[in-house]
Image (cartoon, helix red, strand yellow):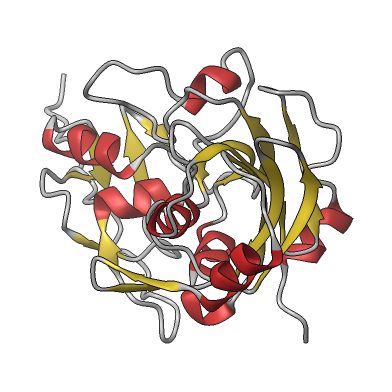
Amino acid sequence: MPHRTRPPSRAPAAPAPPAAGERGHGLARVLSKLGHCSRAQGEALVREGRVRLDGRIVRDPEHRTFASTARIEVDGHAVAAAAPIVLMLNKPRGLVTTRDDPDGRETIYRCLEGLELPHVSPVGRLDKASEGLLLLTNDTGLAQRLLDPASHVPKTYHVQIDRPADEALLARIRAGVEDRGERLGVRSARLLRAGARNAWLEIVLDEGRNRHVRRLLAALGTETLRLVRVRIGDLALGDLPKGAVRPLTRAERARLEPSP
């Protein structure tokens, strides 16, 4: 039989040029932005050699990557951008707002078990003792807009305190305090319900420091007994049961977008 030479193996196609003005990001971050996994999980996948970029294994999580043109595979399966989704969760008290907790505490992702979802991340945080409206999304652009201090998206909290509230206390809350070198102010504060030993206040913030409301009240000699976020911008928690999660409707998502 005549000798037949094998054709040369075809090299991976050169990647297409990135979109005009697109900024490259580390490969692990791009995996996260595409909704495949968290950034930390992406770093592990890359280091383990499980990720191919434009046909080649890349082991550097910070390898500059352009999401619009990159051909990415994980374990041999192509990674494509997941459809954008925004979820509303009524966070119960006692859960931490993270995917994995090094201390083994239960996290908000317990509430998502059994649901067929792309990777979603919380938009901001509620501390372990706080409750109420928490958004989760794979839309990084939306998350960045909501978290940008310049956007001044108001967040409304119902807060139970350990003392009766009079106008003098409300005036001090509205005036704000200095705590640990940070200015803790509010957009508004009003009395919701008064009792003999405690009261419920409505406090609206348009910025968010770590444990903002609790620190402000503590600086005024007032303990926070319960803290429930009930609204973000024009989006209200409503009657969603504790621990329940649901996708936002198109109309609800529109309320989160900036006004033209």
Q: Residue at x 50, y 58 (%)?
A: 140
Where is residue 142 drawn, in percent x and y? 59, 63
Image quarter of the C terminus:
bottom right
Looking at the picture, how far across and down is residue 15, in whole percent? Answer: 32, 64
Residue 241 to residue 174: above or below: above
Measured as percent of width and height from the top left, residue 84 is found at 64, 50
Q: Give me the residue at 75% from left, 32% from top.
A: 246
* Relative vertical location of residue 96 with respect to residue 252 in this rendering, above or below: above
- State the residue at coordinates (52%, 51%): 123
Q: As rendered, which of 72 and 201 lies closer to the eye? A: 201
Residue at 63% x, 22% y is: 116
The quadrant where residue 69 appears? bottom left
Q: Residue furthest front?
A: 196
For residue 184, say whether it is visible: no
User: Residue 57, position in %: x, y?
Assistant: 17, 41
Quadrant of the drawing holding the N terminus: top left
167 vs 130, left or right, is right
Front one among 191 and 147 = 191
